[in-house]
Amino acid sequence: MQRNTATVGAAVIVPTLVLGPVFSILLLLTPAKPAAADCGPAVSVSVDANTKVDGYSQEQLKNAAAILGAGNALNLPAKGQMISVMVALGESGMRVLDRGDAAGPDSRGLFQQRGNGAWGSYSDRMDPTISATNFIKALQKVAGWELLEPTIAGNKVQRNADPYHYQKYWPEAVKLVQALSTGKFSLEGGGCAIPGQSGAGDDYPWKNSPTWMQAGAGAAVASPLGMFYRECVDFALWRVNQQMGSTSAPFKFLNGTFRPDGQGLGSALTWKAGWDAKGWATGNIPLVGAVVWYAPGAGGADPTFGHVAVVKEVKDNGTYVEEGYNGNPPPDDHNYYTRTVSNTVPSAFLYLPIQEGKK
């Protein structure tokens, strides 16, 4: 059973009951770990003749270590360190270049920084630590860089023509940071999440809370996220928060604050519009952890409000497994469910900023 949800005041939800097929919304993600285990500052290590990383010379490893050291000095979390290494790989192959290119003949150094005064002197740009420090300071000034795709965050600093130029260097950046860092961090959950693993099943924290139909008059039926308990949208928004590293109040993403234009995220009907308003990517390829969006009537979804779910597993035969809440008819509505769906049935897949591969 789907309903239109709108925030009234701070957290009050006004439901509009709609009859039709029952579906749920859940964003299947890797369960978040305690803050101490999440991706944190990476610590650079000294690189000597015994340090080996397949595919990289000692010169490249020393330059990568200089970037990590600069990031650590500026309290840059590991995701930022990876972005910095990714950009250096994309700009110079992790080498201090004393030449530019057609687009920037005065570009120099690891980050191919221009001779326009913004990046210091020639010697600054040719110094791995100083040039990395200047890049990182510029990255830290990008509003919300932690939530952007790595290649987009890098492009906000470098302003090169192709915002996805750095995307192919991300796996190697992760590899280098992990290899050269003494800091222990997880790539699952939190700001450094790399989607690709399914969630832990029904770990929704309010699974025993009353639905709006079960609650008596005046009873609280809205979760801390501003959605009705045990609805598809509430479960999905929980997963969005979870994968983005927000697992307890105050949650980062709420029904009433998700969109930058001030409108509520609302029912399943408006989720793609909410993604568009936020500038987050959508596409037609299922990725583990992506929100599955059904337009009204698509795939048997409610003809008025549609449906949302989350990709739990992607199979090789053109199907994926989705999970969610409120996806079965009574008496099993408002409970956790999973089902296998053809990739072509949903109207769109809604990606998180940390997810790549949107085509």
Image: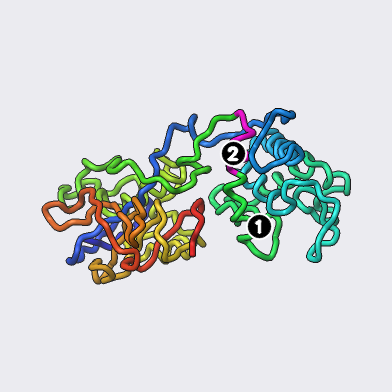
Given the image, on which type of amino acid does mark 1 rest? Asn
Question: Image point 20% across, 49% down: which residue?
Answer: 335
Mark 2 and mark 1: span between their CA atoms? 18 Å
Q: What is the tally of numbered marks visible in this picture?
A: 2
The vertical placement of 112 against 261, above or below, is above
Residues 333 and 99: in front is 99
Q: Is residue 180 highlighted in magenta?
A: yes
Q: Is residue 53 above or below residue 210?
A: above
Q: Residues within 10 Å of mark 1 (few under 14, many from 20)?
A: some
Asked whether 49 or 95 is in front, the reply is 49
Return the x and y of residue 321 as percentages of the image width and height: 30, 54
Q: Percent from the top left, x then y, of residue 79?
A: 58, 43
| Res 41 → quadrant | top right
Q: Which residue is mark 2?
A: 78
Highlighted magenta segment, given as a residue range: 174-182
Amino acid under disc 2: Ala
* Mark 2 or 1, nearer chain start: 2
* Quadrant of the image containing the N terminus: bottom left
Q: Main secondary structure of the magenta part?
A: helix
Which residue has dot 1 on it? Answer: 155
SS assignment at label 2:
helix
Q: Which residue is at 71% across, 38% downward?
A: 61
Residue at x 35%, y 68% (from the top left corner): 347
10 Å crowding of disc 2: few (<14), some (14-19), many (20+): many
